[in-house]
Amino acid sequence: MQAKYPPGPRDGRLGISFYKPFRADPLAFAVDVAEKYGDFTFVRLGWVRLYFVNRPELIRDVLATKVKSFRKLGRQMRSLRKIEGEGLVVSEGTTWSRHRPVVQGSFHGRHFGGHGNVVVEYTQRRMERWTAGEPINIADEMNELALEIIAKIVFDVDLSDDAARLRDAVHSFRTEMQKEVSGSVHLPDWLPLPGKIRQKRAVQVVNDLIWSQIRERRTSDVPRNDMLAQMLTAASAAPVPISDAEIRDEAATLFVAGHDTTSAALAWFWLTLMQNPLVEERVLREIGTVLGGRTPTAADVPKLHYLERVVKESMRLYPAAAFLFGREAIEDVEIGGFTISKGSWVFIAPYVVHHDARNFPDPEVCDPERFAPGRIEQIPAYAYIPFGGGPRICIGNALATMQIILMAATVLQKYRVTLAQPTPEHEMEVVLRPKGGLRVLVESRAEVQPIRRAA
């Protein structure tokens, strides 16, 4: 009996013709398939049976109710494991269950006051490097700033003078990872290819940082209260011993993922704000009312209601995780009336879900009030998933949101940011970024004219 599949493109050649466009731009391919065939589709790519699952109730099945029928895609995890080891993003089963409580305590709200102070201090220091009226690449600036902040929070070290080198190392790794996961053939790491060499050097840069910090903790009697110290303390009290190598993996995950997605989200936040002057005007009024000119703190975040909605709307329009890491069915499982057979791949694209008019009316319009009380309840469960969902939802989602709000408020008190280039295209480098960066002008807030209302 012939297998039955959801709708999707067919080429009569086992999908060979789809491989090149999928590899070149997987997000564009997913958007095109969704527009033509719907939000639950099937595509054969040679030997791969690939399902795009972008319907909220089916996303819930994959990420929550039937999560045990899936594992993260081996090809992606094999590549990511080189830098993050068996950290929370990569690990499965008992390893994930053992590690999660050890890391979870570092994200408790009681630490957010100190984290917020770091965010504001480092943002102010970064702004001191800017010259009013001169262009900057704010995507790069936010990347380095987010890296400095996460290094201070995780390791209590100041990497301001080394941020660019570390940023380039992570960028190099991500670039090579994207090539690996989309390639038709997996090449062994021992081959002396330029990409393999760049990737190994990038991993070594991150390893040198983390292991030096772990060794320092093990040889010093000076008490520390950064995330690494908290994880080491929690590991020592864990029911099953957790080694320093395992802590290294979690620290690498926090460091790499903790700045990469946040910085991408910040770049898209600035684009959203620059393209919507009336939204910017309302944000400025709220910042003025809540802060009254003083320096923001973590305690102010719950009061900056509208700014938080703008942050959420920018993550809807431009989710940094435009694709969640793929899943592989480890058994036959029923989804949406179809049987997804063992070994099939499942991809979920938050970008597609976030731009579905059934979930978000007028999806291309920036409307922060979607997240206001009375309207946020209308958003279907699993239709807004910038941090994933289910038990594997990003552990740092609250910290990342707080960082973006505080960084934005700190910058906007002093500067107005205006676009100095055409609207950028998207680029997938594991996370979604503005292609080629984002060049802007920063103007002193005291010298710019008030924003004019649209006629």
Image (spheres, grey):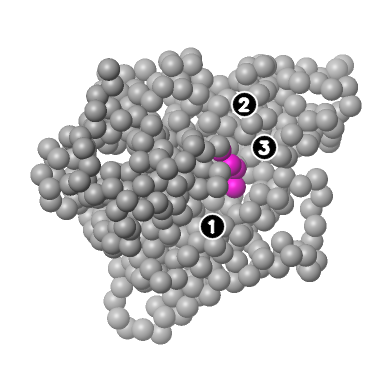
Would you say residue 113 sits in the magenta stretch?
Answer: no
Q: Which residue is mark 2?
A: 31
Crowd band around label 3 with a 10 angstrom C-alpha radius: few (<14), some (14–19), many (20+): some
Q: Is residue 134 left or right of residue 75?
A: left
Indicate which disc residue 87 carries: 1
When asked about the image quadrant of residue 72, the answer is top right
Question: Residue 156 at what x, y percent from top left?
Answer: 34, 69
Residues 238 and 320: in front is: 320
When asked about the image quadrant of residue 275, the answer is top left
Secondary structure found at label 3: loop
Q: Single out the residue that lies furthest toward the right.
A: 13
Specify which label sits upstream in the sequence, 1 or 3: 3
Amino acid type at image mark 3: Asp
What residue range appears in magenta? 426-431
Q: Is residue 196 left or right of residue 369?
A: right
Quadrant containing the C terminus is top left
Question: Residue 54 at what x, y percent from top left?
Answer: 58, 25
Q: CA distance from mark 1 to mark 3?
A: 28 Å
Q: Which residue is mark 3?
A: 25
Q: Is residue 68 visible?
A: yes
Residues 238 and 440: in front is: 440
Indicate which disc residue 393 carries: none
Question: Residue 393 at what x, y percent from top left?
Answer: 47, 41
In this view, 374 is above or below 354 = above
When asked about the image quadrant of residue 378, the answer is top left
